[in-house]
Image: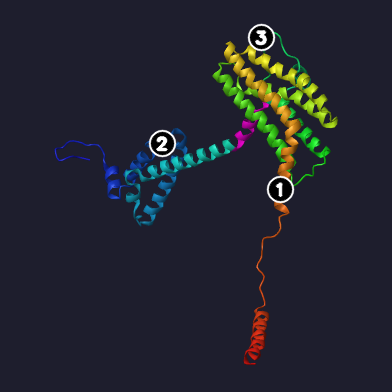
Amino acid sequence: MAAPGGRNLPDWGGFQDDVQSGGGAAVIDMENMDDTSGSSFEDMGEIHQRMKEDDEEEGEGEADGVPEEGDEDGEFLGMKGIKGQLGRQVAGEMWQAGKRQASKAFNLYANIDILRPYFDVEPIQVRNRLLESMIPVKMISFPQKIAGELYGPLMLVFTMVAILLHGMKSSGTVIVEGTLMGTAIGTCFGYWLGVSSFIYFVAYLCNSQITMLQTLSLLGYGLFGHCIVLLITYNIHFHSLFYVFWLVIGGMSTLRMVAVLLSRTVGQTQRLILCGILVALHMLFLLYLHFAYHKVVEGILDTLDGQNNMPPPFQRVARDLSLGTNSVLNATLQAVPAQSG
């Protein structure tokens, strides 16, 4: 192609033909640039496939000679690329939300698995710790070891619940709507958890080196002596025998806990406060279970029976007014002749 100055210029005929024919090639280039800008490497295959489909659609449009309306408006400024990125972002957020929900559901087993070390203990270890809970230690110059498991204490609490139910049944108390079991469970677990929390709080104030788990384990194994005393005295009803077992067996289990706390507490005043509170609570609880627990439960049952056997409330009864009216009329008729006479 020759220019007006006689100079030869490159052949731009193809470009002019494309521009005159509607700028299909130029539009394809802009579309490719907009689609690939900001895209990730993994989406290149999808973009390439979409480019091929657009080429085929444009080729069919040019062959038919009917231009498609809205092509330039829909593809201007890379609207397809923006829509694709927004779609992928929304899909990613939905995937992450579903993944979090699924992980919460599957983590339930993991949360339960956290408690497994506290209950993973051999039966022979539980037996040895039960025997050790009845033998006070003499060495308090160094901290005594405390078992960091809850299987033994939990089983002892349930055993005490069964012993209390046995004692109530042997005394002839009738079960009313599960009141006995609920009261026994509440009493035993309330003492174990409540007194353990209180002792841990006092130990913290007295600067004693003990954790909440160790306090639960120590007090739980300390209930072994209570179970032995209650099981014997509920079947053999002699108060003198109970007092002997209370001092010997209950005292030995209490001294074991006192010795452990003494070895983990520094200071005479702190030791006196902490151990005095523990001895008072532990020994008085055994007296309560033997003497006052039955009376308290029987009082609760009597109260429930009284509420169930209460007479029905006072009800008004409709009266027959005709009887009263007739009697008044008869009296009046009898009085009238008397006055006239």
Residue extending furthest toward the left: 5
Task: Identify whether 335 is placed above or below 105.
Answer: below
Where 132 sits versus 113, above or below?
A: above
Q: Quadrant of the C terminus?
A: bottom right
- Quadrant of the frame with the N terminus: top left
Q: Could you tell me residue 329's position as x and y percent?
A: 65, 85
Q: In terms of secondary structure, where does tag 1 sit?
A: helix
x%, y% of residue 291? 75, 32
Is residue 7 shown above or below 332?
above
Under circle 2, the secondary element is loop
Q: Quadrant of residue 136?
A: top right
Tag shown at residue 140:
3
Left or right of 15? Residue 99 is right
User: Is the Cβ of the residue at disc 3 closer than 8 Å to that at disc 2?
Assistant: no
**In-front residue for pair 249/336:** 336
On the image, the x and y values in percent for residue 72 come to 32, 49
Residue topped by disc 1: 304
Q: Amino acid at mark 3?
A: Ile
Residue denoted by label 2: 39
Please report contact status of discs 3 and 1: CB closer than 8 Å, yes or no: no
- Cα separation between marks 3 and 2: 72 Å
Quadrant of residue 143 within the rendered picture = top right
Classify 10 Å Cα crowding around label 3: few (below 14), some (14-19), many (20 and above): some
